[in-house]
């Protein structure tokens, strides 16, 4: 028979143990820090990341936790956000975008970092080489920036009558945009085209840019590739292209499926899946220095014929035959 005093003592001891057990369980669960430029409208991309984690045996809320930090298109916020993740003692940092990757690298030489960037990570100074990154970084490159001139060339082939192309750029999405614009202007000159550069840093800016493109006589618009609005606001870009009857080109499948006329690039959602896979491998003990940076092995030309018809654009059968996919 347990006396009342003994019962109270046992109860008190159990109550004290519960918080300790819960805290131990939380500490045993690895935490991933996810550093990104913008959180709006990126649910499909995050789904790709979670798929990669699941493929590696990890599920958020079950055996792994994720701390998301977004700079909300203000790159100068990244250092504080990265420092916060380090204070949280995350096991791995995911750095989405060039600016996030650079800041994360500067913030820690210990915590593994898995990046996804739109340009060459060796040229960016993130890794020593693609095959053997060295240090605490590895990841995935979509090489989207380098595809810009090729996208312009395909646009010219699709619409031979085009003479002036608007280039929508978000200067706050990452760094090195001056180099990208110079490359695009050089490609335009070689094709006998004129480029109009239109900067935008918000949703209202994008709408003003479309109106300005039409006013300046542009006959097509290219949304900046990689980490710009084509990724974060595909629906708005597609809707404005239809409203202004301006053929719009991007490099993301998400934009094309919701209404932009043409795209050429890789599947960014699948790239995020690869990021998730690498994070899972690192949580299981692999070292980032020994994980080669993954690159796209296939690029797709996709045409949204339904959108083309909606704006009165006729695309030749010769061009359509070349497409990997035609959305009707």
Image: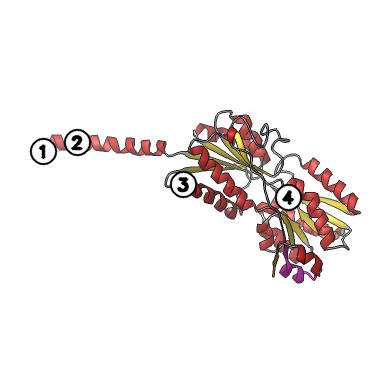
- Left or right, 7 with respect to 283, comes to left
Magenta run includes residue 299: no
Residue 225 has which mark?
4
At a point 64% along the width and 51% down the height, the residue shown is: 268
Q: Are discs 1 and 2 less than 8 Å apart at CB?
A: yes
Q: Are discs 4 and 1 less than 8 Å apart at CB?
A: no
Q: Mark 1 points at which residue?
A: 2
Disc on the earlier residue, 2 or 4: 2
- In the rendered view, tell whether residue 38 sits above or below residue 318: above
Residue 10 has which mark?
2
Q: Nearer the viewer, mark 4 or mark 1?
A: 4
Secondary structure category for the residue under label 4: loop
Disc on the earlier residue, 4 or 1: 1
Q: Are discs 3 and 4 less than 8 Å apart at CB?
A: no
Q: How far apart are marks 3 and 4 (CA)?
A: 32 Å
At a point 74% along the width and 66% down the height, the residue shown is: 242
Q: Distance between the residues labelled 4 and 1?
A: 72 Å
Q: Can residue 29 be seen in this view?
A: yes
Secondary structure category for the residue under label 1: loop
Q: Name the residue under label 3.
A: 57
Magenta highlight range:
302-314
């Amino acid at each position: 028979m347990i006396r009342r005093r003994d019962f109270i003592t046992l109860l008190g001891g159990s109550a004290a143990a519960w918080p300790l057990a819960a805290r131990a369980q939380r500490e045993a669960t690895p935490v991933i820090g996810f550093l990104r430029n913008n959180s709006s409208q990126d649910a499909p991309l995050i789904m790709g990341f979670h798929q990669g984690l699941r493929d590696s045996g990890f599920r958020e809320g079950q055996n792994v936790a994720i701390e998301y930090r977004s700079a909300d298109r203000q790159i100068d916020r990244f250092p504080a956000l990265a420092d916060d993740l380090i204070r949280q003692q995350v096991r791995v940092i995911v750095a989405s975008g060039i600016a996030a990757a650079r800041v994360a690298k500067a913030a820690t030489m210990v915590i593994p970092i898995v990046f996804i960037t739109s340009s060459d990570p060796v040229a960016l100074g993130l890794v020593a080489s693609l095959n053997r990154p060295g240090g605490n970084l590895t990841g995935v490159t979509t090489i989207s920036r380098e595809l810009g001139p090729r996208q312009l060339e395909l646009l010219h082939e699709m619409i031979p009558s085009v003479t002036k192309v608007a280039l929508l750029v978000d200067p706050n999405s990452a760094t090195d945009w001056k180099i990208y614009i110079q490359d695009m202007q050089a490609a335009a000159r070689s094709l006998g085209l004129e480029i109009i550069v239109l900067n935008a840093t918000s949703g209202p800016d994008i709408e003003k840019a479309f109106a300005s493109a039409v006013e300046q006589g542009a006959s097509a618009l290219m949304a900046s590739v990689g980490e710009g609005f084509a990724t974060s606001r595909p629906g708005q870009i597609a809707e404005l292209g239809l409203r202004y009857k301006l053929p719009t080109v991007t490099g993301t499948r998400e934009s094309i499926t919701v209404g932009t006329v043409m795209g050429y690039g890789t599947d960014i959602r699948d790239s995020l899946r690869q990021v998730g896979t690498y994070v899972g491998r690192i949580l299981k003990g692999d070292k980032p220095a020994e994980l080669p940076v993954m690159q796209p092995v296939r690029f797709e030309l996709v045409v949204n014929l339904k959108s083309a018809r909606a704006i009165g654009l006729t695309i030749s059968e010769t061009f359509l035959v070349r497409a990997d996919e035609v959305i009707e």
